[in-house]
Image (cartoon, grey):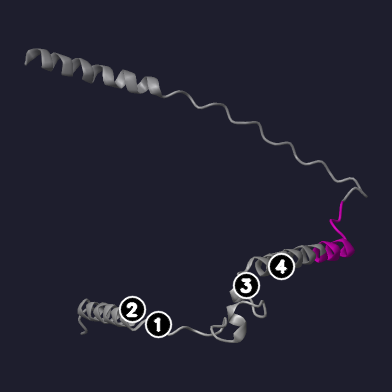
Amino acid sequence: MRSALITLLVAALLAPAVAAAQFQPLPPAPPPEPPPLPAVPGSEESGISGLQEALLILAGVVVVVGIGVAITRDARRNAPAETRPGAGGPSSSGAGSVGERKKPDPRIARKQKAAAKRARQARKKNRPARK
């Protein structure tokens, strides 16, 4: 018990010395920046001209249109034959074309309807009470 008290007393006396050793004086402030030099007449740049701006905008439009053309060409080339109209696949007869929807399986439709009903009832049950 006595040794613990002595250890605690020594630690309490050394703590301020250790804490003071962590702080160092602040570094000196950086020198102030020199004032900017006055502009020499005729050396100012006015940026890009109107013609250059129009050409840059035109180049941007050409790049975007080119990317769009490349994407659509690749998509048409890699699409399966049965989904392309007039490709001679099974959809060319008119049945099951791209715009038509297949009739859902009645068992799946019943399951989906029952799940939606359970979810609706759960939402109603968890609504906060009206005042």
Residues in magenta, as a range: 45-58
The residue under the point 75% across, 68% down is 65
Seen as rendered, the residue at the extreme left is: 1
Earlier residue among tags 1 and 3? 3
Which amino acid, by three-letter code, is at mark 2?
Ile
SS of the residue under disc 2: helix
Report, in whole angstroms, how far the alpha carbon at label 4 lies from the one at label 3: 15 Å
Q: The disc labelled 3 sits on which kind of residue?
A: Ala
Label 2 neighbourhood size at 10 Å, few (<14), some (14-19), many (20+)? few
Q: Amino acid at mark 4?
A: Arg
- Kindly check if marks 2 and 1 are in contact, taking CB atoms under 8 A apart as contact: yes
The residue at the point 23 percent across, 77 percent down is: 122
Residue 89, position as x, y percentages in the image: 61, 77
Residue under label 4: 73
Q: CA distance from mark 2 to mark 1?
A: 7 Å
Helix, strand or loop status at disc 3: helix
User: Closer to the N terminus: mark 3 or mark 2?
Assistant: 3
Q: Residue type at mark 1: give it.
A: Pro
Question: Dot 1: within a 10 Å radius of its alpha carbon, few (fewer than 14), some, or many (20 or more) residues?
Answer: few
Judging by the rendered image, the residue that carries numbered circle 2 is 108
Left or right of 119? Residue 3 is left
Residue on which the image places disc 1? 104
Residue 81 circle label: 3
Q: Nearer the viewer, mark 3 or mark 2?
A: 3
Front position among marks 1 and 4? 1
Q: Secondary structure at mark 4?
A: helix
Q: Residue at x 82, y 66 (%)?
A: 58
Nearer-N-terminus badge (1/4): 4
Q: Nearer the viewer, residue 86 or 31?
A: 86
Q: CA distance from mark 1 to mark 4?
A: 33 Å
Side (left or right) of 55 relative to 82? right
Q: Nearer the viewer, residue 85 or 36?
A: 85
